[in-house]
Image: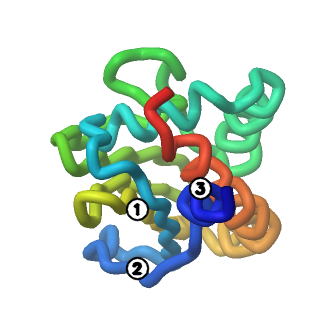
Amino acid sequence: MTLQTDRLSARRCEVTESPAPLSDYADAFEVTVDEADTRTAEEVMRTGLSRVAPSRFSALLMAHRHLLGFRLGPPSAADHVMGWRVVTSEPDQCRLEADGPVMAGTMVMRRADPVTMRLTTFVRYRQPLARVIWAFAGPIHRRAAPQLMELSATPR
C-alpha cells in the first residue's frame, strides 16, 4: 500500500524544459505512471482535469479568466484544454498556451521517461501588476499542479 501511495505522489522537480520566451516564473512537477500506460501527454492532462470536482473546475476557470486575465477558448473544445490553446500535441508532449493583457502562461506536459510524466509551467509578466497577481496566485498554483498530476497518474 505504501508503494502505491508513494507512486502516485507528485513531487516538485527541476525545470528541464527550454523556457518559454522571456518567462519570469517557471516550475515543474512530476508523477510516476505505469510503464504500460500508453496515453498521450494530452490524454494524461485531460484525464486529470476530468477528475477535478465540477465546482473546483469552475473556480479554476474563473481564476484563469478573471484573476490572471487569460483570454480562454471553450474549455471542452478539441483544440483547447481547460480553455488553454493546444499548441503542440504529440504522443510524448503537449504544450498549452493562454494569453492575456497582464500575463501569458505556458504549460508543457511531457513524458520525461517511460514511467514519469512532468508538468512544467511558465509565466511571463506583461505588466508590473502581473508580479503582484502571481504573488497571490503562485502558491495556489503550487498546490493545485501536483494535485492535478496525482489525478492524472492513472488511466482509469
Residue 78 image offset from top left, x and y in percent: 35, 18
Q: Which residue is mark 3?
A: 4
Q: Earlier in the sequence, mark 3 or mark 1?
A: 3
Pointer 1 local density, CA inside 10 Å: few below 14, some 14–19, many at least 20: many
Q: Earlier in the sequence, mark 3 or mark 2?
A: 3
Up-down relation of residue 117 to residue 70 (above or below) = below
Closest to the observer, 75 or 128: 75
Label 1 – label 2 distance at C-alpha: 9 Å
Up-down relation of residue 137 to residue 25 (above or below) = above
The answer to whether marks 3 and 1 mark residues whose Cβ atoms lie closer than 8 Å is no
Report the disc number at residue 78.
none
**Mark 3 residue type:** Gln
Residue 114 image offset from top left, x and y in percent: 24, 58
Q: Quadrant of residue 80?
A: top left
Q: Residue at x 27, y 43 (%)?
A: 36
Q: Which residue is mark 2?
A: 15
Label 3 – label 2 distance at C-alpha: 25 Å
Q: Report whether residue 88 is seen.
A: yes
Q: Which residue is mark 1?
A: 118
Q: Is residue 144 left or right of residue 14?
A: right
Q: Nearer the viewer, mark 1 or mark 2?
A: 1
